[in-house]
Image: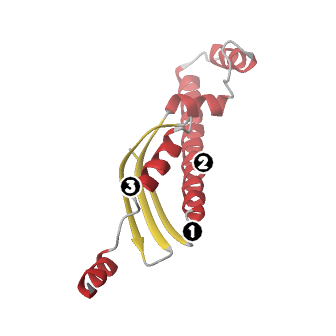
Amino acid sequence: MILTKNAKALVGETLPVSTVEKLVFMLEEDDVINSVHDVKTEVLGVDTVRFKAEIEFNAEAITRKIKNLHEVPGPESAKLLQDVNHITSEIAVEDWLMKNNAMYQTALSSELQRVETRVRGYLREANFKNFYVDLELW
């Protein structure tokens, strides 16, 4: 009995499967997330948990957020078409592409931080005081 308790304290336990399933379901309900992979959890002590997962983001949903393209056709898609139609050289198209890729990278970083905040909130509601959240791109 004491050996079992000590072994669990040394190795750590995982979160209950039902808790992990609810957390993954919550994440996959998010518009910018396609799927969640390779989830690993570890409970350390009584109030500390580690959550690690790989997230496959929905690039189209993130792009729609960046460009405010909630309805097509719409005012934002018309503006986008105007912007693209003004591209008249290879240098201009490369500049446009680089600018949009930089915007996407910034938006992806923001989404990753937002999702980490949601995970922390969920773990806080599950009565953990300390959490280590490690989300990676899939």
Relative depth, front residue between 64 and 34: 34
Which residue is found at the position 67% from the left and 23% from the top? 70
Q: Which mark is residue 33?
A: none
| Foreground disc of the pair 3, 2 | 3
Q: Position of residue 46 (x, y in %)?
A: 47, 77
Question: In which quadrant is the N terminus drawn?
Answer: bottom left
Residue type, numbered disc 1: Asn
Q: Residues within 10 Å of mark 1 (few under 14, many from 20)?
A: few
What is the spatial separation of the Cα atoms under label 3 and label 2, in whole angstroms? 29 Å
Q: Which mark is residue 17?
A: 3
Q: Position of residue 114 (x, y in %)?
A: 60, 50
Residue type, numbered disc 3: Val
Q: Is residue 39 left or right of residue 29?
A: left
What is the spatial separation of the Cα atoms under label 3 and label 1, in whole angstroms? 16 Å
Which residue is found at the position 39% from the left and 62% from the top? 41
Q: Earlier in the sequence, mark 3 or mark 1?
A: 3
In the picture shown, does residue 87 fall above or below 116? Answer: above
Mark 2 residue element: helix
Q: Is residue 111 left or right of residue 17?
A: right
Residue designated by label 1 = 127
Residue designated by label 2 = 110
Mark 3 residue element: helix
Which residue is found at the position 60% from the left and 38% from the top? 103
Residue type, numbered disc 2: Ser
Q: Position of residue 91 (x, y in %)?
A: 55, 25
What is the spatial separation of the Cα atoms under label 1 and label 2, in whole angstroms? 26 Å
Mark 1 residue element: loop
